[in-house]
Image: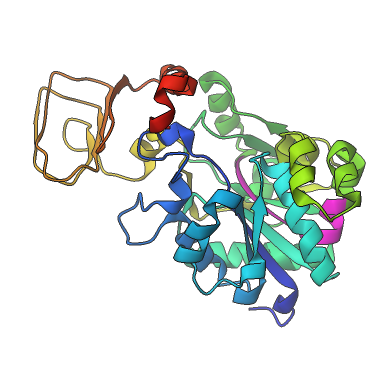
Amino acid sequence: MSENNNHYYGVIMAGGLGTRFWPISRKSLPKQFLDFTNTGKTFLRRTYDRLLGTVPAENIIVVTLKEYRAYVEQQIPELPGRNILEELYNRNTAPCIAYASKVILARDPQAVIVTTPADHIIIGREQFDKTLRLAFESASEMNELITLGIVPTRPDTNFGYIQVSGGSEAITAAQPVKVKTFTEKPSKELASVFIKTGEFLWNSGIFVWKASVILEELQALAPEIMSLWSEFSDVDRIYTDCPRISIDYAVMEKTGKATVIPAKFGWADIGNWESLYDYMAVPDEKGNVTNISGKHLFKNTSNSILYSSAGGKLIAVQGLEDMIVVDTEDVLMICPRDEQKLKEFISELAMPQFEDYR
């Protein structure tokens, strides 16, 4: 660790509802508090442990919804109570980052912060630590907003893309480089073009910056958020009035201070069932990914996701292709492996008759 690491802070954003992983992830217990990886550690705990390689334990802060505080306390019992910041509502990442940055700046005017979602998978801890230390050192020396950009391995449409200044040579150098453009989740064709140029990175959603600098940029580019924080006495009222907007839209796509460090550690944003299929399991000879606690019998079934958390039950499946089958104690979901169809399907849960199953 750097000798200046007492000014290093970590902010874990853990207030998401995880609805795209229904019915395993529920509003009452979303995915960041679950162990999807069968390691004995939840996403949140893994993220906390990962930051300990660079950030002092007393400087790690978790931002979450009020109703999830007990989960944070249970999964990170050593976390000081004042390091759990409660949100009344989920307002996406920009309000969350504004809140945490205000709190940290009041504690330490020299603070440099890494902000990370709670639900990422990182493979290659040594490389991650090395990249994060470089980001901290760079942010300490420059008034830049640094993001970690993942060197892509395929034209994936589930991620945002960052184009760097300096092209492929800048990516190979793996040093801080100015951002040229941000592109939200592109089409398959456009993503393929991005990969061929060699000058695009995946947007990891992991940021490093001085607390003072991100607050200045929020003030300049998202005054509708920062005007609410002029008085810091009533956080619930602020969240009631605050717009729902991501830090990418609010700041990163507008700022002239966007810088990226190309990162080569393994990374996955586990956002939905399809990403679970892609990154977290090895398909069998028929292309099926399974996570079933009891016995199962599959016949003539291929390229499907089969998941069960209800033990003691035989799961028998025949004749399925490109499907998702998820079995829990109170829900059985069968749906095509089509992200848009699944999203539309799950949106029906907003109907009053399904309230008990959200």
Which is more toward the observer, 280 or 43?
43
The span picked out in magenta is 202-215
Identify the residue at image location x=69%, y=57%. 175
310 left or right of 27 in image: left
Q: Is residue 284 above or below residue 53?
A: above
278 left or right of 108 in image: left
The percent position of residue 84, horizontal first and vertical second, equals 63, 62
188 left or right of 325 in image: right
Identify the residue at image location x=77%, y=57%. 101
Q: Is residue 157 above or below residue 49?
A: above
Residue 34 seen in render: yes
Q: How many marks?
A: 0
301 left or right of 108 in image: left
The percent position of residue 259, horizontal first and vertical second, equals 76, 49
Residue 242 seen in render: no
The chosen color scheme is: rainbow
Q: Is residue 139 above or below residue 332?
A: below
The percent position of residue 9, horizontal first and vertical second, equals 69, 67
From this viewpoint, which residue is outermost toward the bottom? Answer: 3
Which is more toward the observer, 237 or 121?
237
Q: Quadrant of the N terminus?
A: bottom right
Q: Is residue 209 in the magenta section?
A: yes
Identify the residue at image location x=56%, y=46%. 151
Identify the residue at image location x=55%, y=43%. 16
| Secondary structure mostly seen in the magenta stretch | strand
Q: Is residue 218 in the magenta section?
A: no
Which is more toward the observer, 105 or 231?
231
